[in-house]
Image (cartoon, grey):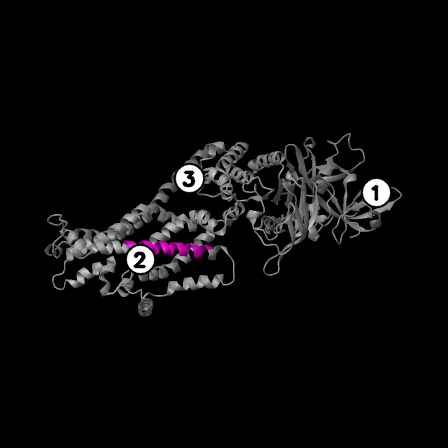
Amino acid sequence: MATDVMPVASSETSTRPKPRRTGGGNVFGGLSHVALVIWSILVIYPIVWTFLGAFKTNTELFGDNPLALPQHFGWDAWGRAWAKAHIGLYMVNTIKVVAISTFLTMLFGSMAAYVLARYTFRGNRLIYLLFVSGLSFPVFLALAPLWLTMKNLGLLGTHTGVILVYVAYSLPFTVFFLTAFFKTLPTSVGEAAMMDGCSHTRTFFQIMLPMAKPGLISITIFNVLGQWNQYLLPIVLLPGDAEDKWLITQGIANISTSAGYEADWAGLFAALSMAIIPVLIVYVIFQRQIQSGLTTGALK
Amino acid sequence: MASIVLSNVDKIYAGGVKAVNGLNLEIKDGEFMVLVGPSGCGKSTALRMIAGLEDISGGEISIGDRVVNHLPPKDRDIAMVFQNYALYPHMTVEENLAFGLKLRKMPKSEIQKRVQEAARMLGLEQYLKRKPAALSGGQRQRVAMGRAIVREPQAFLMDEPLSNLDAKLRVSMRASLNQLHERLGVTTVYVTHDQVEAMTLGDRVCVLRDGLLQQVDTPQNLFDSPVNLFVAGFMGSPSMNFAYAELTRDAGGAAVVFAGYKLPVPDSTFAEKPGLDRYIGKKIILGIRPSDFEDSVAANGNAAGWVRIPVRANVTEELGSEINVLFTIDAPPVEHKDTVAAQNDGDEEETTLPLTGDKSLWTARVNARSHVRPGQNIELVVDTHNLHFFDVDSGLSIGHEANIGR
């Protein structure tokens, strides 16, 4: 008797909740898809507009349909931006500055974070809090003193000055993030390395850094993006008389401000595209690592 | 290979907590010493002090004939196996094994030789090119062992190396560890909270509690003559049964009386335990190992000198080869601080259900042929030669050679 009833009951329970569950999933899935579509449009529309604009003429740009295709795909605007507005030079400058400052940020940031996360000593907490308090320090507040300091140091209008300031501004978040990350790594691996005969330095560079790779990559990308897009600091630290030292953001802004009435909008868009493309490429290459880096901390 | 000597070793943490308190221990050359105790007894701290991962607050540790108090871990010539394996995740098995040797600037051919040798010994040859993430738990454990073996150190230190493995693997790894020690003969200090592991692996076992050394002896001696209630309750599974009892002597000879039972105490016991006669007429704590019981039916024939007691089986746990019979006796449970500490294995939540009221629940391990069922009245026989007597106040074993004069 019982065996007669059982299959019926089980088939009922197995079939009934299923559509209900997927139904509920559909509502949420649908909503989230709508949200994602809106978000994608918000992000993609300006980018496409920028890229298309780089191929248009000024008249076309002010036409009715911003997403209309240009008459012909010419590279005139790109050439003007590269040669006349020196975007090429500025991009090389920026790559140089960002590469060095990101490297230094990661080197010092990870070393500081490791020590703060792993060693107990007097003042550990204080140093950590000092770093973290840097997070709440707005860039604007320091512009005037920074300018004065750099001038006194003779570093105004030099890339060294910009790099130093970039490193200083990137360290707080880097240290904050990496300290938390190093704390999630098992202590026994470091201890095993010590037993194997590693010095503290070697333990850090050969054992802990490779283990922290996901975290290091995501924070590196974060720093590269932040420093690549930095505008305010270069304007202050690389004034107009050091035009050959300018960074890409300054160069782009200069296109729109220097032309007066007859602005070269297509050139501006071309310059913008040139600034966006390297960042996009970096992001696409490291996309997987960025995601894994952001989630590993949470998983452990 | 070398002996390890700890003399009056203290570990005091910030805040004044004494994790290890005046520990004296001599681990002989080639010996397998197991440190065992409940969580927080200081066994891991002691091991980490030998390793050099923790500072020594007081006392002296020497390995071989060197005092190592101020030597960094790498100069102590020891290798450690960690509970969570602590393999380098970005290196292959081969690189993991070779890492310590490379740091010691050993010639490449020698490294290669040692790695191959260890890999063959541990059955890791086909995994040498894999990374730890692609290995199973048991394989990772073997790599961790291999990393210690290739170093050919003075001593191995092992911090609960088997506790992350599943039960079956743990048993087989235990056997492999035994063989390995047999073969290499390296002095080994092994930390575990599992008393079965301690009994099966150790040449000698050191029982710790709250940072204090309780007893160091061979597993069999620990089992047969525990120094106090704590060791008696901690070693052996199922653990020893305790009851308050009175020691009497009348025309029929000495006897111990508890819960309506009267067990004669043979004269040989008084000879073995000097000072026991002073307790006649006084209250003591009686301890009986579950293995010193037998079902009177199954024990037919060899029960000479054994005493019969009738009990009612509440629960039976059939293990195939034997049956654990749980029964209540009409006496309040012994609540000495030592017995509580021995039962409490660190997990505060792990208290047994209070189903027995104010009666003590005893366990008898009987032969599987007994066919006893829950609720049945059966007659058990007790080997009265193996009774244990403890002082009610101090919890010390009466007549134990270490306790004479204490």
Tag 1, which secondary structure? helix
Tell me which amino acid carries mark 1: Ala
Q: Separation of disc 2 and disc 3 at Cα?
A: 57 Å
Compared with A268, B189 (above or below) is above
Measured from the top left, where is residue B66 in percent x and y?
63, 48
Q: Which mark is residue A13?
A: 3
Question: Looking at the image, which residue is at 48% across and 49% down?
Answer: A203
Judge if badges 1 and 3 mark residues of a common chain.
no
x and y percentages locating residue B67 in the rendered image? 64, 50
- The rendered magenta stretch, by its main secondary structure, is classed as helix
Residue ID for mark 1: B271
Question: Mark 2 — residue?
Answer: A227
Q: Quadrant of the N terminus of chain B?
A: top right
Q: Which residues are magenta?
A: A95-114
In-image side of A20 versus B54 (left or right): left
Of the two numbered discs 2 and 3 on the same chain, state the one appearing first in sequence: 3
